[in-house]
Image (cartoon, rainbow, N blue to C red):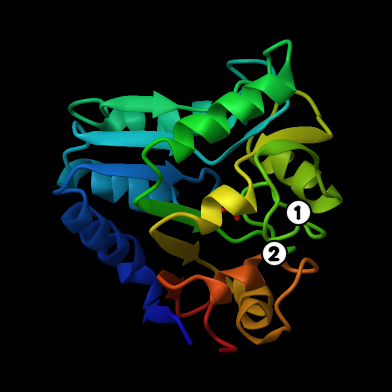
């Protein structure tokens, strides 16, 4: 077993994760960050604790939506984290779904991430086991690419306040994610109980991409007690 499972009571979960992360941010880091509901309370807390001015931030994924849509990942990261920081990160980069040549954009992003690598990648856990937008069916060596969204993921856009629907997105590949020096999987809430149990207990494979994390040498799973109820 190469992962470390940290189970934290709900009320302390954001603070515990934020404090551990702020400690890591004392050194110059290249981080990859998720968006969505899970990290939101961590971002609120870490903004008051940490100095990001020596940090390079890569946004994990992006939806095929126009710039400015509230459900865009760059927009959510801006609202949930970047707008709260007293000093901006050294650099923020993300996949741009409005580029004419999306294949070239994926190639650019992958090369930028690889040039220096990732020290720490934070991930949310999709109810269907996706990591970023690496939906079920994704192989462990899948590259940064344009993807079709799973039905469940399309539905989550409503929760994120999307002004329109979309059936596609772009994501950092599992290949790039698995190359990260360290990975933190953030799992919060009773609606994640069964997918967390399956992440730790199912056979490793593309049916549940999160299972691949068990093959990474340096993973911390930060779960609240509700999410960890069955592990
Ligand atoms: P959530 O999304 O944090 O909004 O639950 C997680 C994910 O789909 O990766």
Q: Are marks 1 and 2 in contact (CB under 8 Å)?
A: yes
In the figure, residue 97 lies in which quadrant? top right
Looking at marks 1 and 2 on the same chain, the residue that comes earlier in the sequence is marked by 1
| SS label for mark 2 | helix
Q: Which residue is mark 2?
A: 209
Q: Is residue 38 visible?
A: no
> In front: 120, or 9?
120
Residue 172 image position (x, y, % from top left): 60, 42
| SS label for mark 1 | loop
Q: Does residue 166 appear left or right of residue 10 in this picture?
A: right
Residue 142 image position (x, y, % from top left): 70, 50
- Determine whether the beta carbon of the residue marked 2 sits less than 8 angstroms from the nearest atom of ligand 1: no
Q: Does residue 176 appear left or right of residue 150 in this picture?
A: left
Task: Classify mark 2: residues with Cα within 10 Å, few (<14), some (14-19) or many (20+).
Answer: many
- Farthest residue to the top: give it: 100
**Count of number-bearing discs:** 2
Residue 204 image position (x, y, % from top left): 70, 77
Label number found at residue 135: 1
Residue 71 image position (x, y, % from top left): 62, 31
Q: Which residue is pictured at 28% across the width and 32% down the height?
A: 84
């Amino acid at each position: 077993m190469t992962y470390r499972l940290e189970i934290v009571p709900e009320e302390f979960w954001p603070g515990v994760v934020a404090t551990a992360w702020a400690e890591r941010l004392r050194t110059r880091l290249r981080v990859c960050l998720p968006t969505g509901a899970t990290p939101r309370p961590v971002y609120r807390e870490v903004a008051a604790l940490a100095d990001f001015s020596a940090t390079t931030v890569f946004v994990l994924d992006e939806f095929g939506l126009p710039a400015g849509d509230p459900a865009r990942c760059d927009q959510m990261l801006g609202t949930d984290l970047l707008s709260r920081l007293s000093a901006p990160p050294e650099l923020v980069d993300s996949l741009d779904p409005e580029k004419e040549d999306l294949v070239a954009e994926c190639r650019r992003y992958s090369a930028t991430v690889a040039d220096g690598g990732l020290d720490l990648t934070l991930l949310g856990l999709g109810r269907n086991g996706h990591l970023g937008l690496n939906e079920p069916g994704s192989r462990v060596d899948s590259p940064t690419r344009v993807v079709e969204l799973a039905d469940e993921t399309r539905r989550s856009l409503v929760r994120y306040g999307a002004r329109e629907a979309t059936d596609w997105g772009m994501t950092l590949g599992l290949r790039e994610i698995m190359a990260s020096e360290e990975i933190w999987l953030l799992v919060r809430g009773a609606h994640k109980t069964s997918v967390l149990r399956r992440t730790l207990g199912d056979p490793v494979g593309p049916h549940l991409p999160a299972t691949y994390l068990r093959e990474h040498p340096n993973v911390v799973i930060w779960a609240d007690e509700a999410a960890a109820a069955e592990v």
